[in-house]
Image: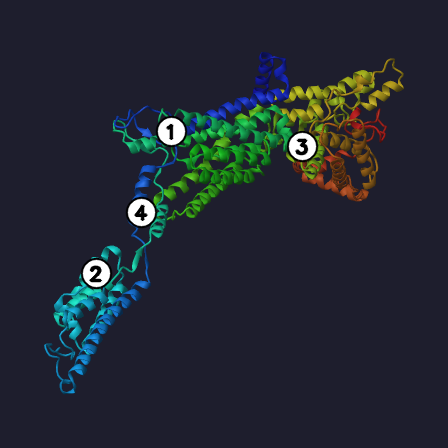
Amino acid sequence: MGGGFAGLGQWLDRHLGEQWREPQVRRFMWGGLFFVCFTLLLATAVAPAQVRVRPGQAAPRDLVAPKQLVDRPATERLRQEAARAVPDQYQEDDTAAQQARQDVERAFQAVDGVREAMARRVRQQGADQGTGQAGGAAPGTGSSGDGGLPAPTEADRALLAERLGFSLPAEVADAVLTASDTTLAAMRRDLLALLQRELDQGIKEDQLAATRMRLGDEIGTLDHPRPLQEFLRLVGGRALRPNLIFDRAGTEEARRRAMEQVDPVVIVPGEVIVEAGEKVTEEDMVRLRDAGLLQEDLWGLAGIWAGTGLLVLLGMAAGGAYLATFDRRVYEDEPRFVLFGLVPLITLVFARLLQPVSPYLMPVATGPMLLAVLLNPRTALVAAMLLAAAVGVMAGDGLRLGIMAWLGGAAATFAISRLGHRSDFMRAGAVVAAVNAATTLGLALMFGSPPLAGLEVWKQVGWAAFGGLLAAILTIGLLPFLESFFGLVTPVRLIELANPNQPLLRRLLVEAPGTYHHSLMVANLAEAAVEEIGGNSLLARVGAYYHDVGKVRRPYFFIENQFGGENPHDKLSPNLSALIITAHVKDGIELARQHGLPEEIVRFIREHHGTTRVEYFLRRAQEQGEPEVLEANFRYDGPPPTTRETAVVMLADAVEATVRSLGHLTPGRIEQVVRKIIKDRLNDGQLDRADLTLRDLDRIAGTFVRVLTGVFHHRIEYPDVVLKEMERSRRRDGPGKEAAGSAREGASPGKEAGHSGRQEKGSRKPEDAGATRGTRAPEDANPKDGP
């Protein structure tokens, strides 16, 4: 754990008792704390401060909408207006015209029938009076004019009324019964035409009386005598009927559709519902109740808190299940576990503070950015999903803001996953800004808001873009604090630690140059191998740089820094020599902490030898016949590597020193040595806690062989005459160019490792496993065990 968090953990251990030291109990403790914090934050955002007010009373203060809600009274008013604007729906009765024609035909048929009866009577009377009077009128009867029929009798009028179904004035009946056939045909034709014209225009039930009056007026313009016009009015008025029938179901459906098409009136967060001092109306009460601002709604308030707590619990359970199943490292490491909850909490606090300005300004991508750098991108994506849900609940516009927050968080995670420099944060912020803006515009178009219809959409787009940039700024500001407090290393911090001008690396180069160049070679090996197995290759490289810094305390007790001089171990007992050799781990830890190195780097120093034995001095003690040779005195304190990266550095450390101590090297010889060292470490239990599979070990071995073969390849041996000519050329160039050449050679880890692989007479390679000067390490011994 880091400095600040480590101190907090120690304080908790002292004050909470033994039972709180169990990891599972601690996780539940932190989980409970985060549950309370998240619930308070979200519930207070959803459930605002309430007031007690009644209709007709003055508002004690400006009552502001805490969230987006639908103005139900205003929306209902608009919907009712839209429904009233819908005309009644009618269905056309196709039988009305047919029935009207039939009524007219029956009326004229009735007239024709009475006229035929009158004609038969006339003929019968003529037959009865004899042929002399056949052509004249019957005695006592008048003659009809154009029809050639006698004047209708009362019996004729009664018969006509019976057949018509209604009575006619005597004048009208007489005119119709005595009219000519031509006149009657014209009347029939004119009436049917007028009826058809009226029916074509459509007649509703409430329009029937007016239509009959209009029909009567039109009949009055016909070229027929007034009595005949009256007959047409009476017949046409009875034949006329509505042909547009009111469709109740259709009308209700049309009005329902019109009401549905009315967009709800929305009250946005921050909008004043009732101003201070203004009288509260019944409609205002509905709005205040919907906004949760009335104290009378205690059950509603309790429901808000209970619902928020339930949602927070579900979200935390989902996040915890993910960690326990897919990211055990974060789940089991207390600082990382706390960060997984703390970073989203900090993000939501900033979101809550900026929400009144605009919900689209909320810098939700801050959380995924920080977690991608401090933990890993996959865990950051999970946190982005949970944050998106929380922001949707907090802002009240769940769908739009939730989608924007999720896509922005995902974009931030991907954009920051290859972090190399602090400037990459702003590049990631620009990506998030573009994604936020595009998402906001796309959602506005999808939900029917034309982009050029008003300024509001473009304001939302602008706030969303600025929110992405703000997320990057907050990430830059928060990252150093979180790094320091939790003792975690980020890619940016690792790159800073890899700078050769770091004080500890400079001291290692100056005081222990052989160890420095050995560390460069180990870093090359470890980085390549960790990259091959999918680990944190940058962490492995930087850890390898510092794994042997403890040797600066006594550099000349290690063979790579003796440069052919006297070996002080020749005058020491094996026990004392082993104590000095193993002490470089403890010395390295002290130096690392003095220089403020993160615990992640200190772990490499502590674990790079595990609990292996100092084989050379153990054998030397046994060969010298020392009494009571305890193997424990010749072992490193450990612990064995606990991560993939520290395990790879342990293997690279041993492999590099062993291969460099050998003489003639071939690819086959290198592979044999590499695989034997890995097998020995595996059999010794040094890799049991490192989460490495056999397949990983095979890949690591292959990578080591490939890199070492490239470094320790055969070089062309120049003839003496060529070497002498090169020497004369260097002397002519002067010391400046020679120094520059040396600097260029030293800048290349491969060249340094290759140069250090060439031995001078009587010297040994770094941490040679050979016993004394002039001997070579046995292949089954670790060269790091020697002086």
First in residue order: circle 2 vs circle 4: 4
Q: Is residue 744 left or right of residue 781?
A: left
Colouring of the image:
rainbow
Q: Which residue is mark 1?
A: 292
C-alpha separation, residue under disc 4 versus residue under disc 1: 30 Å
First in residue order: circle 2 vs circle 3: 2
Q: Seen from this angle, which residue lies furthest bottom?
A: 132
C-alpha separation, residue under disc 3 versus residue under disc 1: 55 Å
- Mark 3 residue crowding within 10 angstroms, few (<14) / some (14–19) / many (20+): many
Helix, strand or loop at label 1? It is loop
C-alpha separation, residue under disc 2 versus residue under disc 3: 98 Å
Dots 3, 1 in contact, CB < 8 A: no
Q: Which residue is mark 4?
A: 83
The quadrant holding residue 663 is: top right
Q: Which residue is mark 3?
A: 540
Q: Is residue 593 left or right of residue 159?
A: right
C-alpha separation, residue under disc 2 versus residue under disc 4: 28 Å
First in residue order: circle 1 vs circle 2: 2
Helix, strand or loop at label 3? It is helix
Horizontal and vertical percent for residue 1? Answer: 61, 22
Q: Amino acid at mark 3?
A: Ala
- Mark 4 residue crowding within 10 angstroms, few (<14) / some (14–19) / many (20+): many
First in residue order: circle 3 vs circle 4: 4
Q: Is residue 757 left or right of residue 191?
A: right
Q: Which numbered mark, 3 or 1, is in the foreground of this view? A: 1
Number of numbered tags placed on the structure image: 4
